[in-house]
Image (cartoon, helix red, strand yellow):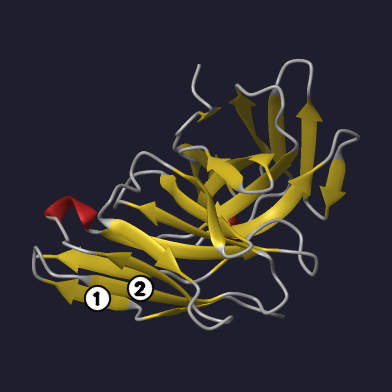
Amino acid sequence: RKEVEQDPGPFNVPEGATVAFNCTYSNSASQSFFWYRQDCRKEPKLLMSVYSSGNEDGRFTAQLNRASQYISLLIRDSKLSDSATYLCVVNVRDDKIIFGKGTRLHILP
Amino acid sequence: EPEVTQTPSHQVTQMGQEVILRCVPISNHLYFYWYRQILGQKVEFLVSFYNNEISEKSEIFDDQFSVERPDGSNFTLKIRSTKLEDSAMYFCASSGPSTIGYTFGSGTRLTVV
């Protein structure tokens, strides 16, 4: 099993729709989880942390399922500006985080 | 908002030459990292640095690579003898008490010709 695995997509979604991504991780000792967003040829930028209780930030909701070792990201009422690659990031310990390959999202007008 | 600064934004070098990529992490951060991303591929971990020493490195980070924190503010990545396959975007990141997660610099695009 890969350390962090994501569906690469692309997900082509009409504007206003809801879209969800999942990510699985292999190391059960992983401590922290994040979703990053990366625009073409730019640096990854933190979108949100993921907590066991689930957390929401505006149109974005993140969930963590430790038993099944996956995290999810839900985007509601998608905007054209949401088009990007979404990176699942797992922190194994303080000195190392591992990136998934990313899921490409295209929001269609 | 505090940020991580990287210079140069783009570096072109001939195969076999040495390059130094520079980063200024966020001032009160304690952990520093270098990652690279080959065009079209995933972001790959190279090395982490804590308390003035390497705490972890990947298989990619071989003897051709080294890191330094020469003056308490800069954090550099040196590639001694560049190869064509070193062409990539190199991202510096830092983490610490003032921010959640890892803050990345805008990257240095290294092109080896």
Q: Which residue is mark 1?
A: B11
Which residue appears at 77% of the width and 40% of the height?
A62
The answer, for residue A109, to whether it is visible in the render is no
A100 displayed left or right of B109: right
Q: Where is A22 relative to B68, above or below?
A: above
**Residues at marks 1 and 2 on the same chain:** yes
Amino acid type shown at disc 2: Leu
Q: Residue at horizontal 18%, vertical 50%? A: B85
Q: Quadrant of residue A57 in the image?
A: bottom right
Taking the spot 72% from the left edge, 80% from the top edge, the residue there is: B1
Task: Tell me residue A7's x, y (percent).
Answer: 50, 29
Q: Is residue B20 left or right of residue A87?
A: left
Q: Are marks 1 and 2 in contact (CB under 8 Å)?
A: yes
Cα–Cα gap, marks 1 and 2? 9 Å
Label ID, residue B21: 2
| Marked residue chain, label 1 | B
